[in-house]
Structure formats: C-alpha cells, structure tokens
Amino acid sequence: AQLYPQWIEAIGVSNNHECRERVQRLLQRLPAPNLLLLRHFLCALWHIVQQSALNKMCAVNLGVCVGQSLLTSNPFGNPSPVPPSSQTCEVSTDLLHEMSKLVPKLVAYLIDHCPDLFGDQTLRLLGAPAAQLIHHDDLHLS
C-alpha cells in the first residue's frame, strides 16, 4: 500500500527501459518475505500463461483476476485505488478508471517479465515444468 503510487507511476512510463528500471527498484524495496512470496506467485502465474492456448489465461487476464488483490492502496479499508489524503478532495471517475486499468497492466508486466526481473531460476521455484501437458481430451472422468 505504501508503494502504490510508485507502482502506478512506474507502469505508466512509456519507455520500456525506464519502466523496467523503476519496477526493479520497487522490487528491491519490498520486504524480503513479500518478495519471496511474490516470486513464487509470479512463477505459478507465468506457468499458467505458458498454457494459455489451452486455459485461455493470458497475462492480461490473470492481471485482471488477481491485480486488485495483489496491489491495493489501502489493504485494510476502502478498496479505492486513491491514496488517503489529509485534505478532502474529489477524485474524478476517469482517474479511478485509469488507475484501475494500470494495476492489471502492472501484474501482466510482472508475469511477462518474471524471468528477466527475477532470473530464470525463479521459473523452477515450484519444481520443474511438466514435460508434457495433460490435455482436456486425455482426462477420463468416471
């Protein structure tokens, strides 16, 4: 929650190199247990994306599904993506809508760039990937 504005700002940067640099700096600021959990979670999501032809879950879809749970500006109160302010101010619905699109975009970025951000070894945190897929047609339900 504390780094929320910086995450939103980082993913809004159009220059790919600058975006990556900002994301890496933010990852370094996470507490070690949070970073460890994030690496494992992104490993699982990355492997899900690798099977998107079968499961229809691309990085963007996963970002929509888990983004608001993964990154929120206020985890214990109002789920509004707007950081609390000492002054009362109105936030436009356009700004809220734009910010709500940036969180899934950030999660998709983290998934897509998981090996680059954390190293290839991160992709093996949950074990070696299965050599062959179990296709839907191969499952026999009794």
Image (cartoon, rainbow, N blue to C red):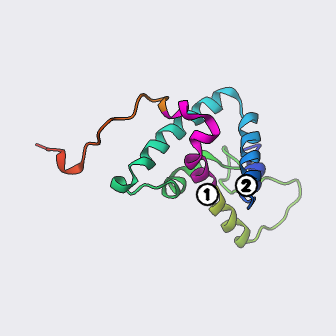
Q: Residue furthest right?
A: 87
Q: Which residue is mark 1?
A: 105
Q: Which residue is mark 2?
A: 8
Q: Is residue 80 left or right of residue 64?
A: right
Residue furthest left as drawn: 142
Residue 94 shown left or right of residue 55 in the figure: right
Front-most of residues 92 and 87: 92
Note whether residue 57 is visible.
yes
| Residue 69: percent from left, percent from top | 58, 47
- Residue at 62% x, 35% y is 118
- Amino acid type of disc 2? Ile
**Tally of numbered discs:** 2
Identified at 64% across, 32% down, the residue is 34
Q: Residue visible at 67% across and 43% down?
A: 76
**Regarding mark 2 in the picture, which secondary structure is present there?**
helix
Magenta highlight on residue 108: yes
Judge the density around disc 2: few (<14), some (14-19), many (≥20) Cα neighbours within 10 Å: many
Mark 1 or mark 2: which comes first in sequence?
A: 2
Quarter of the figure with the C terminus: top left
Q: Residue at x 57, y 53 (%)?
A: 108
Q: Which mark is residue 95?
A: none
Distance in Å between CA atoms under marks 1 and 2: 9 Å
Write down the region rendered in magenta.
105-123
